[in-house]
Image: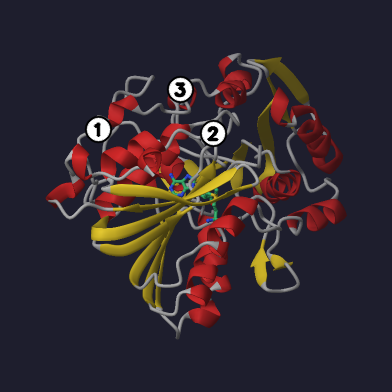
Amino acid sequence: MRDGCALTWVRRAGAYVNGTPAVRPPGKAIADNGRPAAALPRVTLHDEPLKALMLPFDSGVLPWPAQGDIAFLRARDGWPLRQYPLRHLRCEQGFKPLADDLREAGLDVRAELDGAADASLVLVLPPRQRDEAQALLARAVAMAAPGARVVAAVANDEGAKSREKDLQQLAGLDGTLTKFHCRVFWTPPLSGAHDAVLQERWQQADAPRPILDGRFRSRPGVFAWDRIDPASALLAAHLPGDLAGRGADLGAGWGYLSAEVLARCPGVTALDLYEAEARAIELARGNLAAQAGRAALFFHWHDVTAGLAEGGYDFIVSNPPFHAHDRGDRPELGQRFIEVAAQSLRRGGRLLLVANRHLPYEATLAQAFASQRVLAEGGGFKVIEAVKGEVAGGVVKADARRSVADE
Ligand SMILES: C[S@@+](CC[C@H](N)C(=O)[O-])C[C@H]1O[C@@H](n2cnc3c(N)ncnc32)[C@H](O)[C@@H]1O
């Protein structure tokens, strides 16, 4: 199986496990085709790393600072956090659905904190990708005020021991606890005695750089960061050259597919790129800068599962996510992308989708579109073209549908 996206998310409209009701972001156009959103699973119901992160405070091994700002890198909301006074918590989260959750919980959240060395405590949930995780630990140490600690938690199957060694090498360790299939480990109060050379090197470890012979720029941690994803390559190779007008790319990553749309489809006049990872959408902005004169380009840091604010697209392309951070298949993510695409196309508009062959998207496509057909198959992937019905709301009588099975 190809790599999935490192972290994916489906918003759920039901109650949170900690009892805090989920609230839709105000003013956001949430498309709804009638499917109860509560049917979609929420992936942080059991956030073991977050539980582990709070363990040293829960058990009284470490004190929760009484004053001063607390920085939380790769922050996630959840009941283990809510037990503490959070007025001084400053959260950093670049993945939009998680950032939205933190904001809806009333917390101060930014895609990137400014990195000032003034935090009385730095909490970190390092990601799986090594370069990105080392860069994050280096930033965490840099953000600690004199006398502050860095506390990090990682799941055992996401490199807990390696990250623990990293932090030890960088700044020394004062303690470790293991529980919930995770390790939580922390530095002594920092006083500038850490390895400054290593810190400098690691801070650059996930910096943007040229990839693919300089055609694009990318950075460790974003989806398929240093290569063209084979599924996207298959879709690009089978893009109908007559795609024209206003289009969108759902889950645009660092911009590969959009770049191919602009290169292969001369009739495209405008393209909206939607992507949940802040770093990826910024890379896409840079990667498509040279095409800005060729078509109107718009870049949205956005959770596609919440629906799109824009609509009436002539076409949509997507290589949708299908993995959560536990790496299990989450076909409901792709299904939700398909529903949102159907809601956001004009009647007669086309969705061009690529997916792993085993993923069960046909029923959702049949429900939301008037017709679907397989344009290409190869390498375990399928490229599907689906056309939205002429009937209002995309609801088409069954006998008007033409499905893959019919052909
Ligand atoms: C399979 S990758 C495709 C990336 C890119 N289009 C390409 O061809 O390389 C799916 C993308 O969807 C993004 N993503 C995951 N969940 C999302 C969400 N809820 N809303 C928007 N984008 C999301 C991921 O960050 C990832 O960049």
- Alpha carbon distance from label 3 to label 2: 26 Å
Query: At 20% across and 35% down in the image, what residue appears?
Result: 34
Helix, strand or loop at disc 1?
loop
Q: Do we see residue 87 in this rendering?
A: no
The label shown at residue 45 is 3
Q: Do we see residue 132 in this rendering?
A: yes
Helix, strand or loop at disc 3?
loop
Where is residue 273 shown, x and y percent of the image?
43, 63
Helix, strand or loop at disc 2?
loop
Which residue matches tag 2? 358
**Disc 3 marks which amino acid?**
Leu
First in sequence: mark 3 vs mark 2: 3
Q: Nearer the viewer, residue 371 or 38?
A: 371
Q: Mark 1: few, some, or many residues within 10 Å (few <14, many ≥20)?
A: few
First in sequence: mark 3 vs mark 1: 1
**Disc 1 marks which amino acid?**
Arg
Question: Is the residue under label 2 in contact with that under label 3 (CB below 8 Å)?
Answer: no
Where is residue 328 shown, x and y percent of the image?
57, 28
Farthest left residue in view: 392
Q: Which quadrant holds the N terminus?
A: top right
Question: Is the residue under label 1 in contact with that under label 3 (CB below 8 Å)?
Answer: no
Q: Is residue 191 left or right of residue 290?
A: right
Which residue matches tag 1? 35
- Alpha carbon distance from label 1 to label 2: 23 Å
Query: At 46% across and 26% down in the image, what residue appears?
Result: 84
First in sequence: mark 1 vs mark 2: 1
Q: Nearer the viewer, residue 308 or 173?
A: 308
Q: Which quadrant holds the C terminus?
A: top left
